[in-house]
Amino acid sequence: MKHTLLAGLWAAPSILFLVAPSTAQSADADLSPALVPSGPRLADTPMVMEPVPLGGFAPRAVPPAEPPIGRRDQLFPGADPDLANTLRIDDLLQRPLVDRRKGDDVWVRTLRQRTHFAADGVTVFPVFGPDAPNESPLKLEVVEALVGSSALSVEARSKPLVSADDRLVDVQRADFVESWILERDSIEQTFTFHDLPERGELSVTMQVTTDLVASEADGTLRFEREGLGGVTYGAAFAYDAKGRRTPVRRSLDGDRLTLTVPADFVVAAELPLTIDPPISSWVLSGSFADDRSPAVCFTRRPGRYFVTWEEYTSQTNSDCYLTSFTQLGFQGAVVPVETGSDFWERPRIAYVPANDRLLIVASASPNGPGSGFSRIEGRIFRATDSTAATSIFPISTAGSEKVDPVVGGTNLEGVANNYFLVAWSRVKSTTRFSIEYRLIAWDSFAVTQIETLAETEGFRNLEPAVSASHGDSFLVGDFWTVAWTENVAGSFFLFGRIKARRIRWDGLVPGSAFTVNDSTWCSKPSVSSQLDSTYGVSSFRPSIVAYGVIDPANGLKSEIHASVVSQTSAYPASNVTAMEDFKANVSRAQPTIGTDGSAFVLAYQERHYLSSLRTDFDVFMASGSVVRTGSDLRIALSERHQLLSSTTNDEFAPQIAMERDAHTGLSSDSGLVVWYRDLDNPGGEVRGSRVHAETVYGRPDRAVGRQYCSANTHSGNVTQYGPDTSWLWISGNASVQREHRAYCVGMPDNTFGYLICSTTQGNVNMPAGSRGRLCLGGSVGRYTDQIRSSGTAGEIVTFVDPDRVPQPNGNVAVQPGETWNFQLWHRDAFITPTSNFSNACSVEFLP
């Protein structure tokens, strides 16, 4: 029973985002070449960009005041985070979405249907949504045309041609033109005859192929699937060049549909003569949750977030769309990425500044999910105008299942050596999953062959994650960090060790795979880009890997861990959950992490279990920085347990993009987190919220105090969502040359308190009648000259001057290399007036 609960706990159900009218896609002539045979194409001299200065600071400069909490905002200004965004493609589709493909393929999405145009016929796919067990296409193929006693040639002389305004699709046949007029909620089929060999009765016959059940009522031919909806073929009319009009007789004989124009009308008609029947789809349940699997990235030009997601048209088919948002939340066009017959699962997106290109990848299967046959496909878009730069192209081989695709971009300006890294898990057998990867250039050129990153018999390597970019605009030491779960065959599926490896910008892989966390109960890793500093413990700039770890003794409980990794090793894991709010009976899973080069933002899903509080998953965030402690690198938090979304439904699988990932010259600490709200498996709706890391808007201040000792519960105004302990974090740059700030938040309102410090750590619970835990030992100094009230915000800010640190015998100066520990004592009116302590922070000071 425990494993069943675990599987449900870690499953990732569904989505909806604001979507808006589409702009036309580029014509076939504008599409870049599809994937060509791979081979070396590396420039001799890499482009090197000058760093953008962030500005210097004078010694002892006091950082400007910044609010320590609440630095997040919903993507859509004025929206209530507890209200569903009900805007879907169905709601916002103002005109048909046209997806041009190479060859004969043209796909069009209208309100209730997808339509495939090809020379051998037109196929309509009604969009029934996730309630439909499979697709129910209706194909119409012209097989015969007669006028009087003469047969007309129906041979197609052209592939389907789309007009520049995306309103018309033409197929030129030998003796007439078959056209399709595209409207928001329907398509109209027309046959136009410019010349006739004789005059008499005119008929066009089509072969109908479908599993929908045909019936006729009120002049409308209906092809229906019981309980879901269907396709209507409306009454047809014929008209001539002078506008004269007559009804067309329609007959369905088995699988042959014939339209017949009376002879007297044809005889008198002035050519051209046109036959015009409308076609539309209807769905019995017009409102369904059909979205899931959102992914997000940020582009330096034009300074937009791009969000991609999949939409279920049935349980065996999902399409993929792309939209953009400005940094203020205004939405751009919605464009189709894949609207064909393949199941495009779990799309992911990345950006390279070279020609401002986006690559969207997905696991594509022609037979639906879990069919055992799939490959990784991709499509490149222009970030400047959201148009397709290529058709869909293969990245992996076909055959055995390829799942969990991920893609990383770069920060590098210019075109040379500017690539995407695409990785995925390949299922070779039940006991052998491999991690494979390939480098793809900005124009879809395959830079490398398909390479294997990890593969061993008896191990299932799955759930790869890749950093959004190198985190560096120089082509020196540029690495993507790839992490994945190594599951031992025979153990509980989806859980295992977290492994990692770095891949160089040119596809080379120095060193070997290393273990990030050796517990066999880890899952769902996420990787940040490289940070800006080496922190003095390695010659390589680190990344951060976040992942979930469950407690096998309590299958309902899981926690988030974060580990700092360099090129070939991982530093001790820091348990982020234990540093947050110390609540019991809480499960946290599926983290996503991003960085602005100094600080990081970590979002995750959380729920209470065995409790009446929040029994569904909600989305929270934390932020912090990497700090040095001796020869190790660890995590220091600045924000904890910040609520991003809470509804009565599950919020799942958050994904993050930071603006700095588009280029290191961007000093922004802003990002966007997207997730999906599960409404009806496998569907849901997409949501999003902007977030910020605590770096004081591009200045080098960051969290430098590593939390090492938890606080006891206080008697403040605790909500079911908020922390119930006071929370201390310290910002600055860890230098003895600068003043720092200690923020204590989440305190009881209007409570007095002050900071205490020591070079010695301790752990004494409830000393001298206090309600709190004293985490300092030895000589303890008190900042009694900075006694503060928490006020109505429940916050206190204390200034820490390394030249004047209080001790029992007077102030002392901190020396470089010393470690000092800080905690905040405060009053706490529990049952009777008493006192309490915040958690404790440890800071190793630098020169």
Image (cartoon, rainbow, N blue to C red):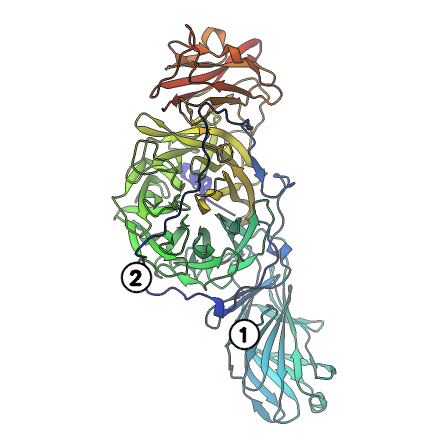
Badge 2, how many Cα within 10 Å: few under 14, some, many 20+? few
Left or right, residue 134 beside residue 199? left
Seen at 58% across and 70% down, the residue is 164
Which marked residue is nearer to the observer: mark 1 or mark 2?
A: 2
Distance of label 1 from label 2 (alpha carbons): 34 Å
- Nearer the observer, 760 or 204: 760
Name the amino acid, label 2.
Gly
Q: Where is residue 625 in the image (x, y as percent from the top left)?
A: 42, 32
- Numbered circle sitting on residue 402: none
Seen at 25% across and 44% down, the residue is 512
The image quadrant that residue 152 belongs to is bottom right
Is residue 846 positioned above or below 100 on the image? above
Q: Give the residue pinned by disc 1.
A: 161
Q: Give the residue pinned by disc 2.
A: 39
Q: Where is residue 706 in the image (x, y as percent from the top left)?
A: 41, 25
Is residue 591 positioned above or below 174 on the image? above
Left or right, residue 82 beside residue 773? right
Seen at 47% across and 27% down, the residue is 580
The image quadrant that residue 753 belongs to is top right
- Nearer the observer, 245 or 281: 245
